[in-house]
Amino acid sequence: MTTPFEQAQQDVQTLSKKPGNDTLLKLYALYKQGSVGDVTGDRPGGFDFVGGAKYDAWAALKGMNAEEAQAEYAALVETLKARG
């Protein structure tokens, strides 16, 4: 049986339009928090702006438990699907 989190991971690949960068960062951060846990390692520096933004988005969720992150991820994907 597929969990809502796993289903959302599949559904996000089939969205009719690509979400904006802020939404993509939120999806990334929730996915990482829900699957890996708190951010680890050093923040990418220099000219790795995308890596830095991803790290910051993920770090902002520090302390959120996996179940909560997975539920929020699934709800966000459902919202994006409803928008078409």
Image: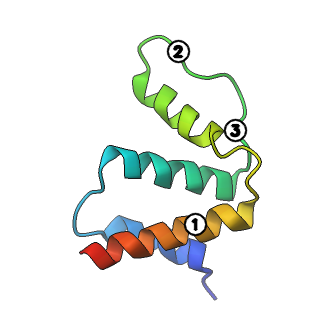
* Residue at 63% from the left image edge and 66% from the top image edge: 70
How far apart are the alpha carbons under marks 2 and 3?
A: 15 Å
Label 3: element kind? loop
How far apart are the alpha carbons under marks 3 and 1?
A: 17 Å
- Residue kind at label 2, given as amino acid type: Gly
43 lies above or below 80: above
Q: If you read the primary sequence from the N terminus, does the residue marked by circle 2 or circle 3 appear first?
A: 3
Residue 55, which numbered label?
A: none
How far apart are the alpha carbons under marks 1 and 2?
A: 29 Å
- Residue kind at label 3, given as amino acid type: Val
* Residue at 54% from the left image edge and 65% from the top image edge: 73
- Nearer the camera: disc 1 or disc 2: 1
* Residue at 62% from the left image edge and 71% from the top image edge: 71
Q: Residues within 10 Å of mark 3 (few under 14, many from 20)?
A: some
Residue 72, which numbered label?
A: 1
Write down the residue under mark 2.
Answer: 45
Residue 13's spot in the image, x, y percent? 36, 65
Who is closer to the viewer here, 78 or 32? 78
* Residue extending furthest toward the top: 46
Residue 82's spot in the image, x, y percent? 32, 79
